[in-house]
Amino acid sequence: MDFSTLTLEIGAAALALILLVVGLFLPDGKKGQVGIVAALGFAFLLVLSFLAPGSKGPFFMGQYMNDGISVLFKQIFILGSLLVTLMSLRFTRRFEDARGEFYVLLAFSLVGMMGMAGATDFLTLYIALELMSIPLVVLTAFEKGSMRSTEAGMKYVLLGAMSSAILLFGLSFLYGAAGSFGYGAVMAALTGGQTGPLVVIGGIFALAGLAFKVAAVPFHMWSPDIYEGAPVPVTAFLAVASKAAGFAALLRFFPVVLVPLGLGMTTLIVLIAALSMVLGNLTAIPQTNIKRMLAWSSIAHAGYMLLGVMVASFAGAAALVYYLLVYLFANVGAFAAVTAWSELSGSDEISSFKGMWKKSPLISTVFIVSLLSLAGIPPAAGFIGKFFLFVEVAHKGYLWLVALALVMSVVSLYYYVSVIKTLVSEAPEGETSKADIPLALRAVMLVSAVSTVVLGVLPGPVMGYIRNILSTLSS
Amino acid sequence: MISIAFYLLTALLFSAALMVILSKNPMSSVLWMVVAFFAITGHYVLLNAQFLVVVNMVVYAGAIMVLFIYTVMLLNLSKDNDNRASLLVRLAGIVSGGLLLTVLIAALRRSTDAAVGDLAQVGATSLVGLVKPLGLALFRDFLVPFELSSALFLAALVGAVALGKKEASD
């Protein structure tokens, strides 16, 4: 039993416990300092993930895998948690006495995400998935005074329970066919000819359960309502880290468990990806609330990223990780800008963005860079991320999918640019109060914007690192 | 010797279970339920399921019963409260109870005395109910999911408190 594999998981769980105790001992007015401890803890974990990636291989009787994919995804989760924590420092001031718990739940959710990236066993996967989701539900409903936040939490817990039920139902069929929980044993049983209609149904149900977590059409219904109702930093966390965790699980699950079920599964995932791209981008156009618009745009991005899962190759995984990193910085940048702006204007409707350029060039610049990256305009990183991804899809022979993705990227340009147009336009009233942006939020915005540009202009070093980790730690 | 203990415990269990639903006072219902739990614990002892004995004692006969007693005391059920169910509900209860009885009888009908004797033999010698195999399963075979689920429970607890706590401004 090699516990060094679990260094990061143990670290994150320990951080959650430390935060819980620190929150207990801080005097009443100073509970907000839990957030600073949390940020330091996440930063420490991020450094640790580079220093001690652990040794490669399956551990704990094949239930847990440490390889390039899990290391890279864990780094993405920790980075997301760190940025979201910094975003929340000012925001959580409005919660009188439950501020510490906000960060405790964030850390617990991080443990669950790491578990999802490492799980190669149905039982571990399911428990990790719940460990990720349950704190997210509470975080969604954290604004107790707000009806919309409570409603979003309610919807999330109900729909999440239903998707869990569907996932478990599917997994039970696969377990029935293979007689084992482990991915490896399931693959051996399925390639040995254990495929019947019931097993295929099991595979489809399991895919549906995971597609819910990444919010891909037709399992996306929950995300616009919940993204809109949740507090903004939580929305960013949902859009970035929770979605990445879903992709980590899919990246392990799809090639090993679903591909042996036959060609139909690849067709199915192609269909889900195409539907997500089309519906996500088209529905984003008429949205008037920025959180709803970003929710639909994140559904569209889930479509692009599912293509990377479908490719099911080393290069596909590298392209997907790079895309996720780009998507993380773009989304965190956009949501940080929304956080800063809604503190100022008290609204997250797109129409309230008028005059943003005059009032705060910093927020506007970060916002514009992030939106351009999401749309895929060079020099922002979205372009190069899409390029890596689409090249792999073309290699696989799905040229029509690449064409569809390109057309949909052009469609997405419309709604991203119309937001930019609104925010540079003149304010209706002439009030010019100076923007007061907290230091941590300012740092998050700057880091996101700079990273977005750097990843777009100089993709070499980061892509080299990703490929290096994948090849040294993978088979 | 064991069969005498078995029949004694069974008789105790049945009478206690009957008293739970027959007694008028909710408080004595709860106390009879404690007796029933003790009888079940005795059955676990006979089956050599050591771990279940301890857990049943601590969790059911201990913690959950305390919870029940407090709930009954806090609800302060008055005696003149006529809470008899309507005819339809009673009929539904009789039908579903009868169905459960049918299933149980169908399952147990085939198990002859010899088979029961075999089972008792297995129960006496196997390690299934002991603490050691259970510990090995939890802390060796399923260590990662087990530890993750402990984190899950703590997270759910913290979340419930965070959501349920009254804000100071309220």
Image (cartoon, coloured by chain):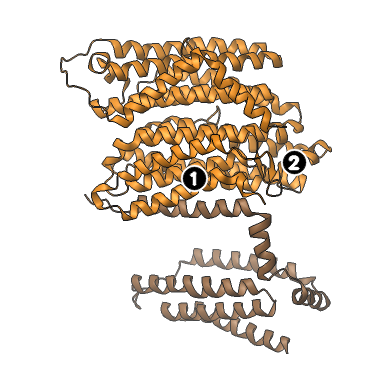
Left or right placement of residue A8 versus residue A392 in this view = left
Residue assigned mark 1: A12
Q: Which chain is brown?
A: B
Q: Residue at x 22, y 13 (%)?
A: A427
Give the answer, above or below, for where A247 lies relative to B42. Answer: above
Q: Is residue A242 visible?
A: no
x%, y% of residue A258? 71, 33
Give the amino acid type for the residue marked by disc 2 in the picture.
Answer: Gly
Residue assigned mark 2: A184
Give the amino acid type for the residue marked by disc 1 in the picture.
Answer: Ala
Tell me what hue chain A is rendered in.
orange
Which residue is more in the foreground, B36 or A235? Answer: A235
Quadrant location, the C terminus of chain A? top right
Left or right placement of residue A387 versus residue A222 in this view = right
Total numbered badges shown on the rendered structure: 2
Q: Residue at x 69, y 68 (%)?
A: B104
Q: Is residue A246 visible?
A: yes
Q: How many C-alpha atoms fall within 10 Å of the one at disc 2: few (<14), some, or many (≥20)?
A: some
x%, y% of residue A314? 68, 25
